[in-house]
Amino acid sequence: MKLSEATRHFLEYCEIEKNQSQKTLVNYAHYLERFMKFAGDADIGAIDLEMIKKYRLHLNRLAPALAIKTQNYHVIALRAFLKYCVKRDWKTLEPEKIELSKIPQRAVEYLTREELEMLFRAVDTSKITGLRNRAILELLYSTGLRVSELAGLNRDQVNLERGEFQVRGKGQKTRIVFLSGRAKTWIQEYLAARNDTLGPLFLNHRRPRAGKADELDIKGERRRLTAYSIQEMVRTAAYMAGIVKKVTPHTLRHSFATELLINGADIRSVQEMLGHASITTTQIYTHITNRKLKEVHSKYHR
């Protein structure tokens, strides 16, 4: 079978049978298209380790240069494709024979409790946008949500009475997240200041452009705050707070996980709360547990 035809079957399988997200489908299509440009419309039976080696050299020598992590994304997509082919009994290279490049363990940037309070205090809550921004910061830190997950939240999704709600994350996986008392308070303050019944939990409060009036957008999707706007808000708040570190929504996610581990949470529970599919991903926080062990040793060893 030709590579182009097999790729089409694979993408349809991912869309229908695996019900993968649109973003995953777009990424798979992009990575596999790059492989097809390299390999030509060859028969999938022609894919072997030598071809893969040459392809990886090609990726490594592209200009502008691709990061090792990005190169691995290409290989992951290719392995998923080959796994599908093998499952269909199409003769090709076994995906298990392809290894990913080793990536140096990255340092995790997180905020101390003092820096977090500086960040929260830097927000001017005298206006509705400030109430919204404070609620966002508290929610990010309370739940460890990804910025895309937070941007997609609707008002009826967040149970303020119970202080918990379900969120759908990467790979369409659902998990329960929990609200701190402070996060609940600031979300309530923000919602109380709104005079609309629009669906999104967080809105862009700038005046709508001509022809973009609210009555033309009953559910309020055009006014939903975007992930990019949230990222910019977090960066601005950190600057106003005088924090010299690079601060993003993901920094608050790291801070959430770090706080849990420092206070004694086990890494499996943290994995579940972060929505990581693999414990390997959560192990980037090993330095935190190592520090905790050092504190225990210092305290009890004489």
Image (spheres, rainbow, N blue to C red):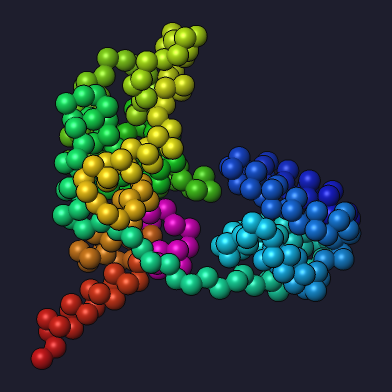
Quadrant of the rendering where the N terminus is positioned: bottom right
Residue drawn at x 15%, y 83% is: 298
Magenta stretch bounds: 272-284
Q: Is residue 279 above or below residue 25?
A: below
Q: Nearer the viewer, residue 56 or 271?
A: 56
Residue at image coords 60%, 71%: 101
Relative to 209, residue 45 above or below? below
Which quarter of the figure is the C terminus placed in?
bottom left
Magenta stretch contains residue 281: yes
Question: Which sits in the foreground, 246 or 156?
Answer: 246
Tell me if residue 261 can be seen: yes
Instruction: Tell me the quarter of the picture where residue 39 sits.
Output: bottom right
Within the magenta stretch, is there residue 50? no
Residue 145 x %, y %: 36, 46
Residue 134 drawn at (x, y percent) = 23, 36
The residue shown at (22%, 80%) is 294
Q: From this viewpoint, is residue 83 visible?
A: no
